[in-house]
Amino acid sequence: MKYFKGSIFHTPIHGELIFIEEALIEVDEKGNIQSVFQPDDQHYQEKLEIAKTDVDFVELSKGQYFLPGFVDLHVHAPQWPQAGVALDEPLNHWLDECTFPLEAKYEDVDFAKRVYQDLVDHLLSRGTTTVLYFATAHLEASLALAKICGETGQRALVGKVVMDHPEMTPTYYRDQSAERALADTEQFIHEVQQMAPAYQQGIYPVITPRFVPSCTDESLAGLGELARQYDVHVQSHCSEGQWAHDHVIERFGKRDTEVLREFGLLTEKSVMAHCNFIDEHDGDIFIETGTAVAHCPISNAYFANGVLPVKHLKEQGVEMGLGTDISGGFSPSLWDNIKQAVMSSRMLEDGVDVTLPPSVRGVEASRISVIEAFSLATQGGGEALSLPIGVFAPGYTFDAQVLDMTAQANQITGYGVFNQPEAQLQKLLYLATPENIKQVWVQGQLVHHKS
Ligand code: GUN
Ligand code: FE
């Protein structure tokens, strides 16, 4: 057993904050939480005596906190070199002129390894312990990403991207045929599943049609069949912007969600990025199929010209977590996306109440709190992926970030005026910087630390 003692913040239920001062967390050899003791529990003292004799005992001091590791539901790993670039372009230009030429370079596996290692290290240093990644259309470089995550200790779900539509993808960067795309995807699934047992934290293959416009009917149907056959995760973009949303309706006479469902791509293990242009009917399709939404608020502010109605979709019952969407979103940090999720929700709610569709402005009761946004980055992400992550409770993995606020103690307590747990977490979420993240743990293993 390993023992971790310190104050914890988490939300086992969306938006409902639990704070335990001086919690004692018991973690087994596999990195799973066995028990969480509170100081007034019967066995707390007795367990604490045992913990103190343990060489692996980790004890936080006052002003340090455990937060669950963050779950990033949408990262394009190959786009890391492009973070912050060309954000003024419309999405389809940005893809054609910047993104596809960059992604094509990952044919060079050495280049891929260099970028991917840097990105994984960087995300861990920002407290992100689980990531759902898009790689590129290249089989070998996509496998390299899965391996790097495995060896660096990050929990990762990785997809080799499928993009085979001859009119919607450039000749220099596409799957050569639907058949080839499906064969490569199947091989990718096998190889990732073969390497997975070596990594305790979990490495998973993901079926990844880039988005409906970039895929032929054949590849979409074949990927749906692979999802059924292998029961692995599925990811794509859905109704991100007006252009993508309309394109699918023109091609199929149906909405993006309906098309994805018909091809068998919406399952309990599916995560669809963005979804800004979905309505209640689409929300029902997600609920019925168990599909989750990856909300990417920074990216949406630049590319989608819309705001996801987070509050309404959550109330409807749609599963949801947060994504950075590197590099549609410039920031590799879910800390930044938590703040943007709150601000975007406020901008959706405020303003003139004109009769415009949802995701414009003036939509009543749209705001979310920073605690709700924190839930999306933790418990919500775990629920979206159907994995036991994002909460400090028995049966969950021990994935944590240690925030050290000792040098800013007065700021965090508002000079003693704001001592309530909720105020302290609000302050942490708004005021902490990457410097404050002192340690990051995944599956009970230390994967990042600052001296
Ligand atoms: N839609 C299809 N591909 C992409 C991508 O790489 N980024 C974003 N934001 N949207 C997409
Ligand atoms: Fe994306």
Image (tube, grey):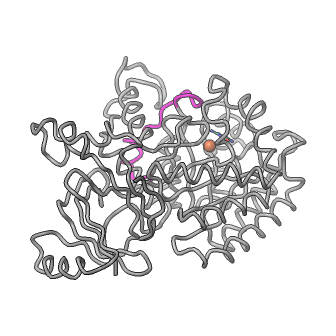
Q: Position of residue 432 (x, y in %)?
A: 33, 40
In front of the other: 437 or 390: 437
Question: Looking at the image, which residue is at 34% across and 55% down?
Answer: 402
Q: Quadrant of residue 182?
A: bottom right
Locate the N terminus by quadrant: bottom left
149 vs 376: above or below: below
| Residue in front for this viewpoint, 378 or 112 | 112
Residue closest to the far front: 451
Where does residue 98 sit, x and y in percent of width and height?
A: 74, 32
Is residue 22 depicted above or below 117 in this figure?
Answer: below
Residue 384 is at least partly visible in this image: yes
Location of residue 87 in the rendering, given as x and y in whole percent from the top left corner: 62, 27
From the viewer's perspective, is 38 left or right of 31? left
Whether residue 379 is visible here, answered yes or no, is no
Residue 398 is drawn in which quadrant? Answer: bottom left
Residue 214, image quadrant:
top right
Image location (x, y in percent) of residue 307? 48, 32
Query: Is 392 one of the magenta-colored residues?
Result: no
Nearer the observer, 116 or 328: 116
Q: Residue at x 25, y 42 (%)?
A: 407
Left or right side of 355 for 184: right
Where are the magenta residues, as a range?
Answer: 301-320
Tell me which residue sits at (75%, 60%) in the image: 221
Does residue 282 lie above or below 386 as drawn? above
Give the number of callouts: 0
- Ligand 2 shown in quarter: top right
